């Protein structure tokens, strides 16, 4: 194939240049350069505040101390937030354990819908079908406290996708504790990435050959 016949590379949806965020006691990370195209991406770095802050900075929830983030052509955090849904981050989208799956889906739908819209009881079913696939999704009347870590992880992703934003930013995969269930979570994220660009935080390396996955290793304090 001639060079002129080669397909053009996919344009990046997210770019970070010299990105850094300073914490109370010094940099959480610095000098991060990323170029993320459509698809499935894993940001590998130690779990904790550094990883969480980097993911949320890419999603426009934090303003960088250094460098720039561009998402779908936008650089301002408020504009970036309109492109990015977030899921499975502590203290951000945690769910009340005393309510049911049906309730949290309906409440999220009502929150996102125009004030005059009627929200049907089956709200969120299409997103549940996409996220859970062939897995047994939790029954509508199941209480949040009864869910496994995998089901809770996938439910929080379902809620995030109700916004229909094109990019999904997902917190540390290690919150799914069991290795087998964690592999299932990766499979579900790979399926979701065929419709939405997915960026997930990981602590340990993933098998990139098994899925169309791009892993980006960020060293502590920088890259």
Image (cartoon, rainbow, N blue to C red):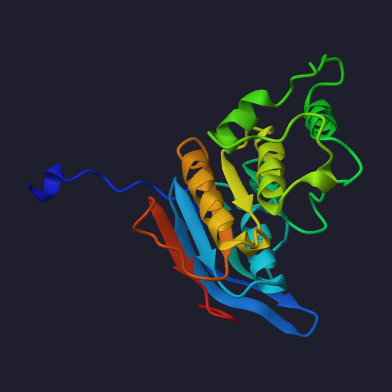
Position in image of residue 145 (x %, y %): 84, 47
Which residue is located at x 48 percent, y 63 percent?
34
Which residue is located at x 66 percent, y 34 percent?
137
| Image height of 116 relative to 85, above or below | above
| Image height of 49 relative to 194, above or below | below
Position in image of residue 51 (x %, y %): 64, 69
Position in image of residue 121 (x %, y %): 80, 18
84, 137: nearer the viewer: 137
Number of marks: 0
Q: Looking at the image, can residue 27 be seen?
A: yes
| Image height of 64 relative to 26, above or below | above
Q: Looking at the image, can residue 79 be seen?
A: no
Q: Is residue 114 left or right of residue 41?
A: right
Locate residue 210: give its quadrant. Answer: bottom left
Q: Is residue 12 left or right of residue 74?
A: left
Position in image of residue 96 (x %, y %): 88, 46
* Farthest right residue in view: 98
204, 19: nearer the viewer: 204
């Amino acid at each position: 194939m001639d060079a002129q016949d080669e397909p053009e590379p996919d344009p990046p949806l997210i770019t970070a240049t010299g990105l850094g965020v300073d914490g109370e006691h010094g940099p959480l990370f610095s000098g991060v350069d990323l170029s993320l195209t459509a698809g499935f991406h894993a940001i590998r770095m130690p779990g904790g505040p550094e990883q969480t802050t980097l993911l949320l900075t890419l999603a426009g929830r934090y303003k960088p101390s250094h460098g720039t983030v561009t998402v779908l052509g936008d650089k301002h955090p408020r504009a970036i937030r309109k492109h990015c849904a977030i899921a499975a981050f502590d203290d951000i989208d945690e769910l009340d354990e005393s309510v049911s799956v049906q309730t949290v889906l309906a409440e999220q739908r009502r929150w996102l819908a125009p004030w005059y819209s009627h929200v049907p009881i089956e709200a969120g079913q299409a997103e549940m079908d996409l996220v859970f696939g062939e897995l047994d999704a939790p029954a509508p009347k199941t209480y949040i406290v009864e869910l496994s870590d995998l089901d809770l992880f996938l439910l929080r992703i379902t809620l995030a996708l109700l916004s229909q934003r094109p990019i999904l930013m997902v917190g540390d995969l290690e919150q799914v504790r069991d290795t087998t269930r964690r592999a299932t979570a990766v499979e579900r994220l790979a399926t979701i990435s065929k419709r939405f660009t997915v960026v997930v935080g990981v602590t340990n390396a993933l098998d990139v050959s098994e899925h169309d996955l791009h892993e980006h290793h960020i060293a502590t304090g920088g890259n």
